[in-house]
Image (cartoon, coloured by chain):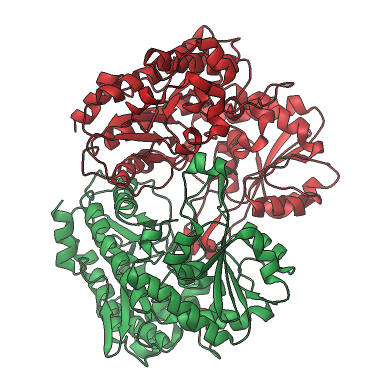
Chain colours: A red, B green
């Protein structure tokens, strides 16, 4: 447990978050678990511990098998009292008093938790891992499963969503820090992009920055010359002259907050005319979407602004024909831009995805049945303090373009002869992190080169 | 699933391993699960997938939620038939025929597994993760829990232990590769060791080599100026002039095999006289232990050879007094060298630790109740093809040296005045990977500098 993470700003924030949560819960109690270490090879060889985001939000530090109990207007953190053997192997940890001082609440030994819970009928939220949920189930005497919200726990889920949707000053500081380190990671990656290089080397260099300057990566990165595979997590290819390298990478800073950025670089340092034309289409779509980010805007409309720009760009290039509004209404653009324009960003890279569309969709709104729009992860009205990604793209996905179940909607509005000119464009995505401000927005990742000229320069600068 | 991992050597090996296992099992069937992805933040944001070592041993490739069924003299691999949405997001995977060709056995869709299992009464082994075990439980209709061997599954556990204890040519090739990449990681780490540097930067540089050239790290590394904390996984300190930096780091190569190496470097590039003296004690202990590694040797005796050398070295330095054999018999050396001299090495860094001391201890042998010796993870007679680590150390652990429950055994044989001279030696460990050969041993990690002069040169070379 690294108590130095709790500087004055963070300490104040976690205390205020707990008070705000208790205010929303009234006289109901809540138990927030940190989760358990996840075994990699065997029980003693685990992945780096990552606490539940709900716990991190309220405690500010990570500790396995710890529990925060909010009841009767007070917060209590329950932690293991480590024995002498633990001190021998893992060193002396902070005392309960030191933890209490840093976290700003009472700290008690874990063995007292069960009696503290007696008669409280506490609400809870599932941890990401089954073992953490099994431990919660045992504590509470009722089933708790990853990703499954019990009816009884919905008030807690809604209260957490309401709080975590709007990033306080401490959370914004963390998001800025995650964005800043991502910038250095992208610079380190760009330096290794050249014909004959490898996806894996670029990824390793970026990961080294994330590990060296922050807590690591916020998700399994995509570093691929096969940009048309949307979540391509394998890095096995060498970089070929004339190819595009799509890099979708994020940093997790020390408190757990994420950045999530995508650039699509020309391996040779220069985009071909067709690549450049298509990068410009995606950049225009991103600009249109970012421009739409402001308080009161509906995120689906932000998505549709990007969709219209993609459709308009493809019409201008001759790949699509017809009226832009009709193309978007029919979802024809989604043949090339099949995913949503972005998602919430916070302690999770898809923030609060563990709570399902309850987090991403406003009450009364549901996923569209339409291909493409149905993948939109967020449909809320924006308010200051929200953070979202804006990440339009253009992809030639064989599984879509070779399947008439998808392409039928286009009819003769898709010009395959024109499309064939763009055979050196497999996939492009440009993604930035955007904070909603009181008078519009701020691009947190603006320092990372993203114009055509700047991306070429980043690679030429190697 | 990266089928290119299955070159002729590996393909031949996994086929032969399956046949050898079936021969040992007679007419009993066995089901080996790969395990499930472990969630990090939420179900869709997982840690990098790592298959169960038993599965990797028999299949040669990783695939989540896959099952290898050995029954009636034949092997069948059951895998998900991925749908179109999966291909859209994750790209087209290899076909069942391509997998069958590479793995060398029949491949069937996962939905056929339950009927294939009907009436077989198959044995199994737990996966590392609770979710993987829950899936196995559901398939087999009986409880399966991480780290818990059911009575009915012991014959399978024993057969796997017998096979995995003796590394075949393919496994040895993997161990060599893991050792080789570790060498480059240590060189990259050494280049960043200097006063004002940081533990985290050294670790990140080494991790980048492991990620860039292999599958990653084989365990959470220790990179610490607080070498006296045996399993110190935090990297928060800067490197101070005159300090020692203990680096315990291993690589996992693509098939899952591990290396595990420790060096203790002088941050300033030169050991102080007291540091040098103590490094020489540990190096002598390592040499004595490595020298004892040969077919027929009992690993506990290898450990005791190191213990004697540590005791003798401390007597020569005046820190201990008395007869070396008596000091070791009483466990006095363990005040400074409290852990075992090493462990099995293979697909797990502590190979087969998921099977408990059944893997590490020969039938009829059990852990010693003595402090120090009780931490010995391996007590088998060595045979050619076994791989072990040899990793003696010297540590000044406050939790031991300030506790008379530990120190009473020393009586007046511990000279604290002499010990006080070594206040700049917090912890030293030197570890290499050793393969038992038909006529002795081979140090797989011999290329990594480990003499006093070579370790100083590695840092000076920065």
For this view, does A153 lie left or right of residue B197?
right
The answer to whether one can see residue B165 in this image is: yes
The answer to whether one can see residue B420 in this image is: no
Spot the residue most to the right: A119
Q: Quadrant of residue A28?
A: top right
Q: Quadrant of residue A453?
A: top left
Q: Nearer the viewer, residue B155 or B149?
A: B155
Residue B178, x across and y down, in percent: 32, 65
Residue beneath the point at 26% across and 45% down: B197
Reply above or below: A195 against B355: above
For this view, does B79 lie left or right of residue A136?
left
Residue beneath the point at 54% across and 87% down: B24
Residue A348, x across and y down, in percent: 55, 35
For this view, does B361 lie left or right of residue B214?
right
Reply above or below: A292 against B8: above
Q: Nearer the viewer, residue A263 or A125?
A: A263
For this view, does A57 lie left or right of residue B180?
right
Residue A422, x across and y down, in percent: 33, 27
Reply above or below: B346 against B40: below
Reply above or below: A132 against A336: below
Residue A232, x across and y down, in percent: 44, 42
Spot the residue most to the bottom: B296
Residue beneath the point at 48% across and 31% down: A7
Q: Nearer the viewer, residue A235 or B127?
A: A235
* Number of disc labels: 0
Image quarter in which the N terminus of chain B is found: bottom left
Q: Quadrant of residue B345?
A: bottom left
């Amino acid at each position: 447990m690294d108590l130095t993470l709790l500087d004055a700003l963070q300490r104040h924030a976690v205390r205020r978050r707990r008070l705000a949560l208790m205010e929303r819960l009234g006289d109901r109690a809540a138990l927030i678990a940190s989760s358990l270490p996840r075994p990699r090879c065997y029980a003693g060889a685990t992945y780096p511990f990552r606490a539940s985001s709900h716990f991190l939000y309220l405690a500010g530090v990570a500790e396995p098998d710890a529990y925060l109990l909010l009841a009767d207007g007070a917060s209590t953190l329950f932690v293991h009292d480590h024995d002498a053997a633990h001190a021998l192997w893992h060193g002396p940890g902070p005392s309960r008093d030191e933890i209490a001082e840093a976290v700003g609440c009472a700290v008690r030994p874990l063995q007292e938790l069960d009696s503290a819970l007696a008669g409280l009928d506490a609400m809870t939220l599932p941890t990401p891992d089954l073992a953490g949920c099994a431990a919660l189930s045992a504590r509470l005497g009722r089933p708790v499963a990853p990703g499954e919200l019990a009816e009884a726990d919905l008030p807690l889920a809604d209260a957490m969503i309401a709080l975590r949707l709007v990033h306080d000053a401490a959370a914004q500081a963390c998001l800025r820090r995650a964005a800043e380190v991502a910038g250095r990671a992208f610079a380190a990656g760009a330096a290794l992009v050249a014909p004959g290089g490898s996806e894996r080397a670029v990824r390793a260099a970026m990961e080294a920055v994330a590990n060296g300057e922050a807590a690591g990566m916020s998700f399994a990165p995509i570093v691929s010359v096969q940009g048309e595979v949307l979540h391509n997590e394998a890095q096995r290819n060498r970089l070929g002259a004339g190819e595009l390298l799509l890099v979708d990478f994020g940093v997790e800073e020390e408190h757990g907050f994420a950045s999530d950025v995508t650039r699509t670089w020309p391996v040779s340092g220069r985009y071909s005319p067709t690549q450049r034309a298509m990068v410009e289409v995606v950049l225009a779509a991103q600009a249109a979407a970012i421009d739409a980010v402001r308080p009161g805007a509906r995120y689906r409309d932000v998505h549709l602004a990007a969709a219209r720009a993609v459709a308009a760009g493809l019409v201008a290039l001759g790949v699509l024909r017809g009226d832009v509004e009709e193309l978007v209404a029919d979802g024809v653009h989604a043949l090339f831009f099949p995913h949503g324009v972005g998602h919430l960003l916070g302690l999770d890279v898809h923030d609060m995805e563990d709570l399902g569309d309850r987090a991403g969709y406003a009450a009364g709104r549901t996923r569209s049945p339409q291909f493409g729009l149905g993948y939109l992860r967020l449909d809320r009205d924006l308010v200051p303090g929200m953070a979202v990604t804006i990440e339009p793209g253009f992809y030639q996905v064989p599984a879509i373009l070779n399947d008439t179940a998808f392409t039928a909607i286009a009819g003769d509005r898709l010009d395959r002869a024109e499309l064939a000119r763009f055979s050196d464009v497999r996939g492009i995505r440009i993604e930035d992190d955007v904070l909603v401000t009181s008078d519009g927005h701020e691009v947190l990742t603006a320092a990372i080169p993203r114009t055509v000229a700047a991306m070429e320069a980043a690679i030429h600068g190697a």
